[in-house]
Image: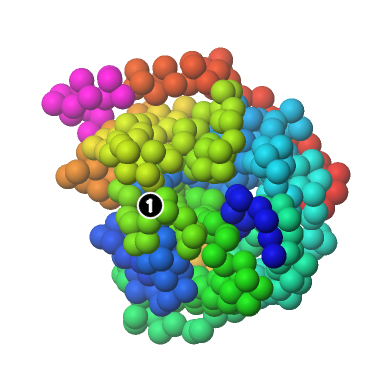
Amino acid sequence: MTIKNQPNIILFITHDQGQFLGCYNSVQTPNSLNTPHLDGLAKNGIRFTNYFCTAPQCSPSRGGIQTSLYPHQNGLMGLVDRGWTLPESNKTLPMYLKENGYSTHLMGFQHESFDAHTLGYDTISKRRSEPLYNCHKMNKNYQQFFKEHQNDREPFFLNIGVVQVHRPFGLWAGTPVNPENVKIPPYLPDNETVREDLSQFYKAIQGVDDCIGNILQMLEEFGLRDDTLFIYTTDHGEAYPRAKCTLYDPGIKTLLLISHPNSDIIKKGTVYEQMASNVDLMPTLLDLIGAEIPKKIEGRSFLLLLKGETETFRKEIYSEKSFHEVYDPIRSIRTDRFKFIINFGKNQDRYQIAADMRQDALGKYFLNIVEKNRPDEELYDLKSDPNEQNNLIDEINYKETAKELKDKLLDWMRRTDDPLLKGKIKDQRSEPPIKY
């Protein structure tokens, strides 16, 4: 029997899922997904509907979760598989938790460092090729971990990383979905090609839901469920145009579910519509376990929100992109009402089509819907135009709003010492020395 007085923490993070989950069905992210285990997690825990990532790409976003700093601050501005790595000068979430009595463990995929051993975990599962990190292949590893740690005297932090639901969707297990039963996002056309692709995406997500059901059952079996804070999230938006690799909402809006049966703070079935960023996760967890929150981070704890002691949280959300396959510097500020974007790169396509989409069966189709000559600045009224289709930057009635948001965005860039203000950002990539 454990004598710890802090909960175990499990962070389960998927790839490229956006807000595609049954309980997130909305006008902006319509879906008909059958995800009973994750929907049950939301019903028995809490759900954030306006949760955003720092960047619409895997490594930069995950680096933000790990450090509670924006990519241009922690130095992870591009993808690990493209030669970027989190500088070891950064302090990470597992390091902070270890200082506060936790054992720390990585099970499966990580995408922040060439070498997972630099991230602060006590144990790291065997490094494998990326497809083998999928949760179906790792199921026995999860079971063995819970069996070994069921009687720990200290709480554990377990980061479960999976490659699902990254393209190609056909890699992942799941119950087949009839293309006629999918719902089409407002930024995609409704045709046979898109429906077939979405049905494969659905299948992969529902496969992850099966894995979550297995993990929750294991936690019950080993007597760990009541004492475990379970977090389900993803790194950024889905792998479709106007989503992944863009700063439009489908690119930066993500899902966040938190469940803890023994907690009086995680109130069952509560939905939070307040805006929050994934840099806020670390300080919230530290606050929740009674640890000191570092001063030199960008995130803020939303514990008071969970306790019902405040109804407000963030007034603005900042997001960025610098490198994916190509250098494409973009910065944005989002409020409840407006989105303002600066495209610092010149003569880029409106939407960068990431390599995984180009290489997929839909690659040629996606390239045909790219818009050219995107403007230097973009302004959207999210109240009247939630799908960000009507750029108001040249509208006289919105000049004052655009100026106010631009000033705030530039102030944020100055305060956080964004190198983009000094010109083109130096490419800091190198060849990964080992398999991450």
Q: Residues within 10 Å of mark 1 (few under 14, many from 20)?
A: many
First to last magenta residue range: 392-405
Where does the image place residue 108, in percent across and percent down from the top left? 72, 61
Identify the residue shown where x is 47% and y is 27%.
344
Does residue 74 appear anywhere in the picture? yes
Q: How is the image coloured?
A: rainbow
Q: Name the residue at 24% across, 42% down.
A: 382
29 within the magenta span:
no
Residue 241's place in the image compared with 305, above or below, is below
Q: Position of residue 380 (x, y in %)?
A: 26, 38
Q: Quadrant of residue 425?
A: top right
Quadrant into which the N terminus falls: bottom right
- Residue 161 seen from this side: no
Tell me what residue is drawn at x 32 percent, y 38 percent: 309
Which amino acid, mark 1? Phe
**Residue holding disc 1:** 48
Q: How many marks can you see?
A: 1
Up/down of 82 relative to 136, above or below? above
Front residue of 240 and 165: 165
Q: Residue furthest toward the right?
A: 433
Residue 183: name its quadrant.
Answer: bottom left
Residue situated in front as seen by the camera: 165 or 278: 278
